Amino acid sequence: MKKLIVIICAVFFTQHNLFAQAEFELNPSQSMSITGKGPGQDATKNPYDGQNCFAMVENIGKREFSIRTQQNGKIIEIIPIKNGETKKVKLLVGYELYLDTNSKGKAKAKVAFEKMTE
């Protein structure tokens, strides 16, 4: 019985990491590196690091902000995201994900990751 409980807990915690999400608060005129800069510099752990995946970015605040993807310093895409919107962003291997705000107030975002099926 104890082994069964340990197995169930292990499965739960493993699955929880696969769907991990994080919330962020961005100050006015702030740029935040979310993923892609390496350990200790990323705002959240991407469980699919080193693989192609999707990032789901939800604007949970009242201010608009933008999502920026880049690779080796070259901007790939900038996507504006209004309050209440959720955007699904393709993150290929080597892409960096940033959240940028130019608003006068704080913006809030929630970021989750999804495996890309090929």
Image (spheres, helix red, strand yellow):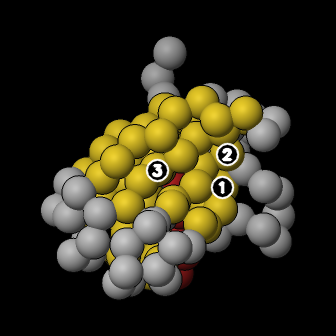
Three-letter residue code for mark 1: Thr
Q: Nearer the viewer, residue 18 or 96?
A: 96
Instruction: Return the disc, 2 or 3, that comes first in the chain's sequence.
Output: 3
Report how far apart the C-alphas of labels 2 and 3 lie in the structure.
Answer: 10 Å
Three-letter residue code for mark 3: Ile
Contact check, label 2 and label 1, Cβ < 8 Å: yes
In the displayed structure, does residue 111 sit left or right of residue 13? left
Say which residue label 3 marks.
Answer: 67
In the displayed structure, does residue 62 sit left or right of residue 71? left
Q: Nearer the viewer, residue 32 or 93?
A: 32
Q: Where residue 43 appears, x then y in whole percent?
A: 63, 70
Secondary structure category for the residue under label 2: strand
Say which residue label 1 marks.
Answer: 35
Report how far apart the C-alphas of labels 2 and 1 lie in the structure.
Answer: 6 Å
Q: Nearer the viewer, residue 93 or 98?
A: 98
Q: Where residue 26 appears, x then y in whole percent?
A: 47, 78
Instruction: Return the disc, 2 or 1, that comes first in the chain's sequence.
Output: 1
User: Which label number is shown at residue 96?
Assistant: 2
Query: Of tags 1 and 3, which is closer to the observer?
Result: 3
Q: Is residue 79 visible?
A: yes
Residue appearing at x 65%, y 62% in the figure: 33
Q: Where residue 108 appears, x then y in whole percent?
A: 36, 75
Q: How many neighbours does mark 3 have within 10 angstroms: few (below 14), some (14-19), or many (20 or more)?
A: many
Q: With respect to residue 4, does 75 lie above or below?
A: above
